[in-house]
Image (tube, rainbow, N blue to C red):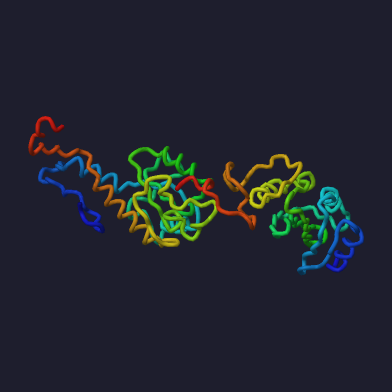
């Protein structure tokens, strides 16, 4: 397992000697393409959404990471950034929208509310963490997190996407045969 | 019309219906009303040629522990002032007539007041929960509400 914090973890280009021919691995090319064309789902629920929008504007410019194409429909997205407080009435809607996203898909829990309920932990209508409804890949702390923190989370997610292997490794041969009668 | 004049007009013209009429803020008159008279009173307040409270701004449900209060905040375009109408309700049966027939804007406000505090607005066309989920148990802004596990299915 590679260490966190480095964005480039996939194997390098194998061969680039012939003109217009690049030899590489399937894992490399798929994970490279996937991790640099993340389509986030516009899921702003509270004040974290303001920071999420701010990260899309010129000052912070999420387009530097190739993730600027926010889509308002789950069918065109593969990353759900849950930015804000999830309440009990919103929870089934969130789960349904997550189910409508096509695989492969990832979820970022942005801010204290989406991660644990945050300041509304004891609220009568607040879900204490979006991870009780959908699986979360990256948690971003903060209340709300600054756009830089969101980018840190997105880069962490990039690394996570790049760790994914499409081609299964060859299974290792069993070292010893199981003793007879003890299966 | 000055605030004193409005306050006197309300106290005289609606004598017996409006009680405790007083000026609370530079543009707001506060008064109390009995819940039995509310529906009729609301129509008269709206139709009054001088005061004319045509617009409902909001309805608040308040838990006073000894009872509930349904508070109507209405506005007059004729005098450019507000009226805050407090209607006291008993704790065991907090029920009051709806004013949706007078001010249609009352629809969602009464739903919210029922949702949060549990005041029943008799005659409301569609008294459902509006902010909380449909199967929520209890009314969370009541002082004696305790958080229930069944309201938190995602644990």
Residue drawn where x is 84% and y is 64% of the image: B21
Of residue B78 and residue B94, the one placed in the foreground of this image is: B94
Q: Residue at x 49, y 45 (%)?
A: B153
Question: Which quarter of the figure has residue B145?
Answer: bottom right
Farthest residue in the front direction?
A181
Q: Nearer the viewer, residue A63 or A52?
A: A52
Query: Who is closer to the viewer here, A37 or B26?
Result: B26
| Residue occupying the far top of the picture | A181
In screen coordinates, is B58 left or right of A182? right
Please indicate whether residue B131 sits to the left or right of residue A57 in the image: right
Q: Nearer the viewer, residue A93 or A65?
A: A93
> Who's the residue at 88% across and 66% down the image?
B5
In the shown orientation, is residue A11 left or right of residue A63? left
Instruction: Tell how many labels.
Output: 0
- Residue A129: x and y in percent read 43, 52
Percent position of residue A5, x then y: 26, 58
Q: Position of residue A92 (x, y in %)?
A: 49, 42
A165 to the left or right of B58:
left
Instruction: Determine which quarter of the picture holds residue A168.
Output: top left
x, y percent for residue B127: 69, 42
Task: State which quarter of the image contains the N terminus of chain B.
Answer: bottom right
Q: Quadrant of residue A103?
A: top left
């Amino acid at each position: 397992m590679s260490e966190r914090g480095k964005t480039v973890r996939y194997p390098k280009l194998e061969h680039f000697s012939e003109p217009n021919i690049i030899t590489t691995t399937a894992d490399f090319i798929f994970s490279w393409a996937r991790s640099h064309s993340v389509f986030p789902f516009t899921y702003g629920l509270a004040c974290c959404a303001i920071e999420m929008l701010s990260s899309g504007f010129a000052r912070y410019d999420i387009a530097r990471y190739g993730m600027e194409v926010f889509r308002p429909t789950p069918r065109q997205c593969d990353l759900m950034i849950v930015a804000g407080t999830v309440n009990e009435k919103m929870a089934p809607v969130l789960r349904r929208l997550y189910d409508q996203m096509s695989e492969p898909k990832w979820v970022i829990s942005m801010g204290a509310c989406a991660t644990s309920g945050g300041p509304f932990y004891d609220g009568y209508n607040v879900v204490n963490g979006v991870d009780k409804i959908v699986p979360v890949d990256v948690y971003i702390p903060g209340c709300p997190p600054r756009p830089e923190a969101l980018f840190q989370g997105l880069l962490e997610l990039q690394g996570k996407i790049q760790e994914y292997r499409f081609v299964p490794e060859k299974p290792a041969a069993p070292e010893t045969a199981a003793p007879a009668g003890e299966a | 019309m000055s605030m004193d004049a409005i306050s006197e007009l309300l106290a005289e013209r609606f004598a017996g219906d409006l009680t405790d009429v007083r000026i609370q803020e530079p543009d707001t008159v506060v008064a109390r009303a009995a819940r039995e008279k509310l529906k009729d009173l609301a129509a008269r307040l709206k139709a009054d040629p001088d005061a004319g409270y045509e617009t409902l701004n909001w309805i608040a449900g308040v838990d006073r522990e000894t009872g509930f209060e349904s508070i109507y905040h209405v506005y007059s375009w004729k005098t450019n002032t507000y009226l805050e109408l407090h209607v006291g309700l008993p704790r065991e049966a907090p029920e009051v007539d709806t004013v949706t027939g007078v001010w249609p804007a009352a629809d969602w406000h009464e739903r919210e007041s029922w949702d949060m505090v549990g005041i029943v607005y008799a005659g409301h066309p569609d008294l459902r929960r509006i902010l909380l989920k449909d199967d929520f148990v209890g009314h969370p802004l009541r002082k004696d509400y305790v958080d229930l596990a069944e309201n938190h299915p995602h644990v």
